[in-house]
């Protein structure tokens, strides 16, 4: 009996596998593709995802392989300066190709003890009170206590569960590829800058080694988006927008994507759960998709591990949907809005001009940055301190940094009073007595994902809250 089978070896799946292994959960990742994809659908990590990597001690793997770009207020291609003092120790966009992110997270999961099986396609599943039976394309059957579908927008797991996926089909499509050009870099930059004055969904930019990433609006929506476009199609669409194709040649890969927007009705059916693109798809505006999936995994991992380990309080696993479904719904809404604001029609253009004026107000830009980067998320833990339900940014302590203490994926009580105790929960919660000039609270209880579950200084009040997230005490 495997503890957890993860269907899908993309960033969400391998992030989840790594999180589960922190708690000793036996996890097997099934990936239908025999080899890793070469398609770079995402080019960066937002601030909250950078924080996630920092919380798990992974950031030192990422930093040498990417580039930090100043964080600005960007919405539908409207660009404004970043406000001062954003609520994060990582106020930048971290540029890194998705293939590199996939590789680093896979390496981490394997080092932690996860088993990755490539060329294994899930084609059937059934569940009972004790577990889930998975059938593979070669006829093999596997048995696990839980199954998580991280198998993308066309999720087989979601389809077999019969979970509804309401929303809108694609009405627009873009062609995407990595290509070489004969035009000079100066010509490309000048022509693209002029074209983007009106076509925000167009771009051709260098990514190194003489290779360019090109994206252009398609002539229509393909009947089968799994079929990649031809190089001639991409060249034609680039000419339609820019008046030249820049001498495009030697495509490394070509793909297409649309603005379909859908959200799963449920994230859990019994012992089967959904995460990442299997649970939500949306236009790529703002580069939020990969980040949303990684953060799904970060929320789910410790909760599912607690369920497997037998100490999860009632409702903990269901809180995954309660917390993450509204976050995805908000991302769907903001990407819908951004797509509308890129339309060249008079109405959307008027709304775009108004949005640009509103973003001149610092608080509007700050709010939008919090939304796009996910540092503004607050889960509903009820009434209380302003930090309650929010993740706590990395703060300096007298003896180091907060995130350095969270690599093991456990809960943490940061106690500035020195009078509190987590006796009974010490196997699940670390008690750190230290002080910080950046924390305006006597003590804060953090969940393994860094969200603040309690603030105060009263021991009885703390003891009343610990079971909500960490189960019954051990005598």
Image (tube, rainbow, N blue to C red):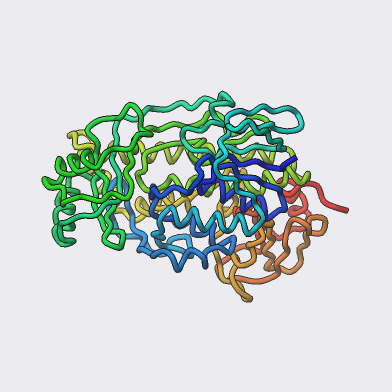
**Residue 450, located in which quarter of the rendered image?**
bottom right
x and y, in percent, of residue 222 in the image:
30, 29
Q: Quadrant of the N terminus?
A: top right
Residue 26 higher or lower than 151, as above or below: below
The residue depicted at 35 percent of the width and 63 percent of the height is 70
- Horizontal and vertical percent for residue 243? 11, 45
Number of labels in the image equals: 0
Work out which residue is located at the far right of the displayed protein and give it: 475
Residue at 74% over, 54% down? 462
Judge from the rendering whether residue 276 lies leftward or rightward of residue 181; answer left or right: right
* In the image, residue 207 above or below residue 416: above
Looking at the picture, tell me which residue is in the foreground, 217 or 388.
Answer: 217
Looking at the image, residue 408 sits to the left or right of residue 58; the answer is right
Classify residue 71 by image quadrant: bottom left
Query: Along the line of sight, which residue is nearer the eye, 249 or 201?
Result: 249
Residue 372 versus residue 435 in the image, above or below: above
Q: Residue furthest left?
A: 243
Which residue is drawn at the image coordinates 72% and 53% (left, top)? 24
- Can residue 78 be seen at all in this image of the molecule? no
> Which of 152 and 245 lies nearest the eye of the viewer?
245
Is 132 placed above or below 10 here? above
Quadrant in which residue 219 is drawn: top left
Q: Position of residue 129 (x, y in %)?
A: 75, 29
Visible residue check, residue 456:
yes
């Amino acid at each position: 009996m495997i503890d957890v089978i993860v269907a899908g070896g993309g960033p969400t799946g391998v992030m989840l596998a790594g999180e589960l292994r922190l708690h000793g959960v036996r996890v097997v990742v099934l990936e239908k593709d025999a080899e890793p994809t070469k398609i770079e659908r995402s080019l960066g990590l937002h601030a909250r995802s950078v924080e996630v990597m920092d919380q798990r001690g992974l950031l030192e793997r990422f930093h040498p392989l990417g580039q930090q770009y100043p964080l600005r207020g960007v919405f539908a291609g409207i660009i404004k300066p970043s406000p001062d003092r954003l609520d994060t120790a990582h106020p930048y966009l971290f540029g890194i190709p998705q293939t590199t992110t996939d590789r680093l997270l896979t390496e981490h999961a394997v080092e932690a003890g996860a088993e990755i099986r490539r060329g294994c396609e899930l084609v059937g599943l059934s569940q009972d009170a004790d577990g889930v039976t998975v059938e593979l394309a070669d006829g093999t059957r596997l048995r696990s206590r839980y199954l998580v579908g991280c198998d993308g927008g066309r999720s087989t797991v979601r389809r077999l569960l019969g979970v509804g996926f309401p929303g809108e089909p694609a009405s627009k499509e873009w062609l995407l590829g990595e290509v070489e050009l004969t035009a000079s870099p100066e010509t490309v930059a000048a022509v693209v800058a002029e074209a983007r004055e009106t076509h925000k969904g167009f771009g051709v930019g260098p990514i190194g080694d003489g290779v360019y990433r090109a994206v252009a609006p398609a002539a229509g929506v393909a009947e089968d988006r799994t079929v990649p476009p031809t190089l001639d199609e991409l060249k034609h669409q680039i000419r339609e927008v820019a008046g030249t194709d820049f001498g495009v040649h030697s495509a490394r890969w070509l793909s297409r994507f649309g603005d379909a927007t859908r959200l799963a009705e449920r994230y859990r059916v019994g012992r089967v759960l959904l995460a990442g693109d299997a649970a939500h798809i949306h236009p790529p505006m703002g580069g939020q998709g990969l980040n949303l999936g990684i953060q799904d995994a970060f929320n789910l991992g410790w909760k599912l591990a607690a369920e497997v380990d037998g100490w999860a309080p009632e409702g903990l696993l269901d809180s995954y949907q309660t917390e993450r479904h509204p976050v995805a719904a908000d991302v769907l809404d903001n990407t819908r809005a951004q797509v509308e604001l890129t339309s060249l029609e008079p109405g959307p253009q008027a709304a775009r001009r108004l949005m640009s004026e509103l973003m001149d107000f610092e608080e509007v830009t700050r709010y939008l940055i919090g939304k796009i980067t996910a540092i503004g998320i607050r889960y509903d833990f009820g009434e209380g301190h302003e930090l309650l339900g929010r993740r706590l940014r990395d703060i300096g302590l007298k003896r180091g940094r907060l995130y350095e203490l969270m690599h093991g994926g456990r809960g943490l009580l940061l106690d500035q009073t020195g009078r509190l105790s987590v006796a009974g929960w010490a196997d699940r919660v670390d008690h750190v007595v230290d002080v910080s000039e950046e924390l305006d609270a006597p003590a804060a209880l953090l969940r393994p994902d860094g969200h603040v579950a309690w603030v105060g200084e009263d021991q009885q009040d703390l003891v009343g809250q610990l079971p909500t997230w960490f189960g019954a005490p051990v005598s």
